[in-house]
Amino acid sequence: MAAHRCSNCAALLILCSLSVFIVVDSQETTLNGGHHATTVHNPQTTTGTAEQTAEPAVEERRWEATAVEEATPDDDDDAAASDKQDTSAPETVDPSSVPQPKDDFQEELVIRPLHSGDIYASFQFRTVWETDFMRGNKVSHYRLFPKSLGQVISKFSVRELHISFTQGYWRTMQWGQPFQPSPPGAELWVWFQDSVTDVDGTWKELTNVLSGIFCASLNFIDSTNTVQPSASFKPLGIGNETDHRFLRYATLPREIVCTENLTPWKKLLPCGSKAGLAVLLKSEKLFHSSFHSQAVHIRPVCQDWQCKTTSWELRQTLNVVFDLHNSAQGKREWSLFKMFSRTLTEACPLASSSKIYIDITDNPQGEQFEVSPATPLLSQAVVLGDRRTFSVYDLTQQITFGTVRSLNLLIRWKSSEGDMLRPLLHAERYVAGYGLQTGEIHTLMYNNHPYRSFPVLLLDSVPWYLRLYIHTLTVTSKGKDNKPSYIHYQPSKDRLRPHLLEMLVQLPPNSVTEVTVQFERALLKWTEYTPDPNHGFYVGSSVISSLVPSIVAMDTNSTRERPLFSSFFPCKEESSYFVRVYTEPLLVNLPTPDFSMPYNVICLTCTVVAVGYGSLYNLLTRSFQIEEPSPGLAKRIANIIRKMRGVPPL
Amino acid sequence: MLTASCCYTDRRRGQLAALSIAAVVIIVGVPLWWRTTETYRAWLPVNQINELANLQLQLSADVEVVFARGTVTPEQQKKVPTQVVISLCLFCSSPLEADLSLHTLSESPCGSLVVYVIPESSTLLPEDVDVYIGQRRTALLRIGAQMRVGRTLEQLLAHLEPRIKQVLQVMSFSHTDITAALSDRVRLSPGNKESIADSMRAFKSSPGYEITFSLLNPDPKSHRVHWDIEGAVQTYIQPLLTKLAPLANFSIDSQTLYYAMLGVNPRYDSSRSAYTLNSDSLAHVINPVEARLGSNAASSNPVLNFLLYVPDAHHSPLHIHDHKKQEVLSNAFHSPRWGGIMVYNVNGFYGPEAVFPVDININMAKVMGVFLAQLRLLLGVQSSAPPPGFLVAPCSSTGLADWELDRLMWSRTVENVATATTTITSLAQLLDQIGNIVINDNIAQQVSSAVTSLQLAVAELEAGNLGFALQYSKEAILASERAFFDPSLLHLLYFPDDQKFAIYIPLFLPMCVPILLSLLKIVSEARQKRRERQAKKD
């Protein structure tokens, strides 16, 4: 009993010291353990002593108060003194002397009821920081901008960085265009500054660091899935550098996005998930949805209209589509609480603007659905070539939260039918063919515009193990051959780089354009197969970038104050808007060998060698003698008959 | 008869063939198979590594003793090999000035010391001070009355020796420093708890350090906190780091973290109407904060964290209490090998009609004073109390005297040598024990360069060239770490020998069975023949 207590005490002590710092700890625990071991014979008395001896040690190491006496450097006295005088005065509340922060944070949530009855929620958090990462000067003091990303930008001389993690596929036909498109899996594209000499090496290091920051397998990005698109991915920020030597683009269609990616993403927000819109980001709800996509975009932007000063913009976006029918048991009713299992009580105190937009364009008189609480604030924004109306809830105003001090938006549908949307541009892709030797990739691009044709840029990055037969490339629209005006093709090298195919194709109005190309499946080395080779191999989405003709005039001033969701892609002309469409990723089966093959081969070879060796051995070692052949059966029978007849045998 | 002899020669031939095949298999086949399935192991300087394992360190520091006029008698002076006796600074009134003027007199290389012996009657030093330690690498030593009794120079020097030894221990290295630096290799003798705590407080030697200042504002709704970290770093931290540049590379970052809470709820002390953090709860403060701090993405150097915590409006003022329940004046504490935390109370600035959020400017002089003291501790700049009779000059503008830097360099060099030796010997031991590890030429080269650098560092330490020794020890540590953590060491680690044999069984079995059988047969026949021959003889 006593021994038991003693061990309990020791365990407590060990636990206690474990919670102290690990470095100190290894010593500490051994110390306690030692006491315990030596004092087993007399537990009752020695527990006390062990406690007494160990306790002060624990306390001593746990923390040490810092003495200030030696703190201020003595000969800095005059400087320090003057500093003290300087700073002690404004230490009191004096807003005029407070330096104006050079960074700014905004948050925004757009909720759009989709025609299919689903709900599309798009979060955007934007940090703009007036600083200069370029030209080699060291940036090291961070306020709202996350330090980890800032260090990445300055260490790797990144000019623009776009990274997205997506779970699920955005159904353009049912849901229309998203505010920020992204392909399934992980996508990363980076523009480096032109001071970078070894772009490939920097890219490799950068992917490794990013995979650490976002807890994702971005370290699987290597030369076999990285391409340098020549036209499809232009910088979204300022800067006229378009030499695609400094661009790298890679996708990982297999990447699975989950909580471990969301947590580091939330950590980059100034308010974390403690205040503001980010309190809604609870993973158990976000990942119980049809589509989930989170992204980080960093780019240099103009500070003002004249673009005299530049600043860095970090946009963190999170798009999620909630399936109405699955989680609402057939009732068409939605609220913030049902979607996120939280309500809003405050804006992030660091945000200069914090707003919720609800798209009510399709619902001007409230015949489709009903939003409560109602808001008098309405806003119009031109987004994706369409003028849309939004109800606005400004979270920085206390009145938004009403008397209950919490905001729980509620959308109740009245009519149940949703008609199919006809997005102007959408695309799909599939693999055709049979057998495990050859196949054909079909890409279909739909232009649903009734009378305008427009050009699209198609980017295809196909891994090397699908060997494209580029001579079989055909582009047809409306049954006729459609000759691309620009083709950039980079053939693959086995185990080194993928195929890259870029084409500028003119899509005739109201048409389907089909791009087909045949391929042959390569045999991989047995170590190159994934752990589940029969699942198949993913081929990343095709990217279709286009300037789609717009019905309404687009806003070309990029620095004007407007909602974040409408200001992501810069607009160069009023009559068209930029759209990027991702197709489905492909899943292709490759011929998979029997993976016990190497062992079988060794066994078979050994057996063949052994058989050959055995016969050789026999030939060499056995001696051969001529033996009287025994008479045949017929002869023997004949002899017996002859014996019976009394004639001499044969 | 003919057939019998034919049969006999045939048998003979068969036996010979079997024997020669067995011989070929054993002499050619087995070694060939062994060679082709062997793992590649480059040559390592094992002997030199073993020599390193029982390393004898010998440190030597140059000490120059200069006698001022009036300290040596004329007959002693005759025997001084070179006439270095100088009349020093006749007009200096304070030791500080004397120190500076002496420094301009002779620039001593790092690691060396100059001791000026001044006459007993000199008024340069205060009454009860015998030794004055300057800001550079100089010390003034007052010659005692009893020291002059010696007739010869040797006697004089013999008298001076203990004093100079003391000076050396303060200014260069002492036995405890070196044992602390060697703590990785040498088991510390238990008992001296204070020195263990001291030795564990400072960061391990590393080629670079990241210093991160974080402002924790758990309550941005009430406080809008501003700190001029850029200016403060320039004014207070940068001079020290410039001085420490030969030791390691430093990089400084700062960040502001909002909604960063401490892990413990402070207790309300109604007698003081303040919240208190007890000493035993401080251990739990850091962990939840550390998750927010974020690791440094751009390098793998150790990070020194300095946190400035502004308590939220509902929990202020917040005071740290030591284990005697006394308020800690600086309101700060540090954690060994991690960093420091300071609590900065701002409730005094609210005023009666404060409107939240309150704008607060932080007094950086106060904060940086604390952080600078913590930084010195964490970097291992130890200010152990000097022995009685010693007077240490006040800090220079850089916050670090030359001899303090030297002291640090001595212990860091020894620590580097010890760490690199441990790494290299344990790597060699590991490679020796596990035969499956592939040793690339690259690794072998790293190991050899580490060994060479180590030998050079030890030699330079013996010669007293501190700067070179530190340089070589850094190279040694880098090369040894690179060799130790090379990923190619892991390639065939988990491919055991029995699997190798199992795979080749289909070859071995059919080959060896006939050979063995025929060998057995030959042996038995030979035995039978001998028996027959014996029977015939009988």
Image: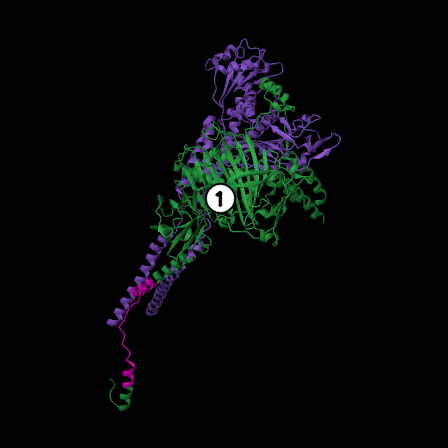
Chain colours: A green, B purple
A72 relative to A228, above or below: above
Quadrant containing the C terminus of chain A is bottom left
Q: Main secondary structure of the magenta part?
A: helix
For mark 1, what is the residue?
A181
The residue lying toward the viewer, choosing from A309 and B418, is: A309
At 24% from the left edge and 89% from the top edge, which residue is drawn?
Answer: A647
Kind of residue sitting beneath label 1: Pro
Q: Residue reaching furthest right?
A: B271
From where the camera sits, is residue A496 visible? no
Looking at the rendering, the stretch of residues picked out in magenta corresponds to A611-638
In this view, B44 is above or below B342: below
Q: Percent position (x, y) of residue A215?
A: 52, 43
Quick one: label 1, few (<14), some, or many (20+) residues within 10 Å? some
Left or right of A256 in this view: B364? right
Q: Classify residue A457 by image quadrant.
A: top left
Instruction: Inspect the magenta stretch and tell me whether residue B226 lies in it.
Output: no
Residue at mark 1: chain? A
Q: What residue is at 35 percent from the left and 66 percent from the top?
A: B525
- A476 relative to A229, above or below: below
Residue A252 coordinates in the image, percent (x, y): 46, 46
